Image (cartoon, rainbow, N blue to C red):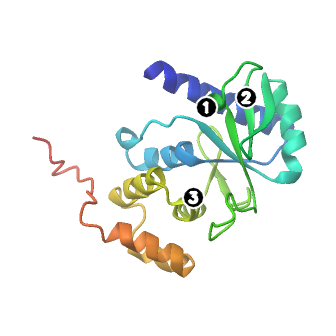
Amino acid sequence: MDDARDKIKARLLRATTALEAAGVPYAVIGGNAVGAWVAKQDEGAVRATLDVDLLLRPADLDAAEQALSKEGFVRRHVSGIDCFLDGRKGKFRDAVHIVRAGEKVREDYVAPAPDVEESVRGDHYRVLTLEALVRMKLTSFRLKDQTHLVDLIGLRMIDESWCSRYQPELGERLRSLVQHPDVEFFDDENDGGE
């Protein structure tokens, strides 16, 4: 498992370093972004993630292709998703997956993806701001998104006061997680160890 995590981390760093060197604006999103924020509170609470997700402006896809191709990435469009395979024989699950900034990932989503400007410099790369990341997670609201949100709630990084930051439907989704009785809060003094 550690080998897989190392490969994902290396892929993320190769891609973000290449984009930065070429001056292509981007933001890390998805599980790696959640991990970067969670690590600020508790490195031990960071979950493993299976892929690399980046936010790019549609107008920057060609520039990103030029930058990433120098690192061996190959641009493809698979099942409606822009991605960069890690080498010509790379697999989709091992690709760098792209979300287009300012566009809806799915037509039925309540909100479009944020712009790359809603990012901050992390330790190694640019990461979506916590507020924008939570908005993305509330918009897609798949089980893994809910799990990421529960982690942020459990670490007291977000709470019910955040509900008013988002449009009503997204605020209600967050409220449902905050008020859910199964949300366990991390507590160093009473970690529940048995």
In the figure, is residue 189 to the left or right of 131?
left
Q: Amino acid at mark 3?
A: Leu
The kind of residue tagged 1 is Arg
Quadrant of residue 18 within the rendered picture: top right
Q: Looking at the rendering, in which quadrant would you find the N terminus?
A: top left
Residue that extends furthest to the front in the rendered view of this protein: 79
Q: Disc number at residue 93?
A: 1
Count neighbours of disc 1 (C-alpha within 10 A) and say few if under 14, some if 14 to 19, many if 20 or more.
few
Give how far across and how far down residue 37 sits, in percent: 49, 50
Residue 85 tag number? 2
Mark 1 or mark 2, earlier in chain: 2
- Dot 1 falls on a residue whose secondary structure is helix
* Disc number placed over residue 22 in the picture, else none: none
Spatial separation of the CA atoms under disc 1 and disc 2: 9 Å
Q: Position of residue 79 (x, y in %)?
A: 71, 43
Q: Residues within 10 Å of mark 3 (few under 14, many from 20)?
A: many
Tell us which disc is closer to us: 3 or 1. Answer: 1
Relative to 184, 102 lies left or right: right
- In the rendered view, tell whether residue 119 sits above or below residue 72: below
Left or right of 73: which side holds 62? Answer: right
Q: Looking at the image, which residue is at 44% across and 44% down?
A: 39
Q: Earlier in the sequence, mark 2 or mark 3?
A: 2
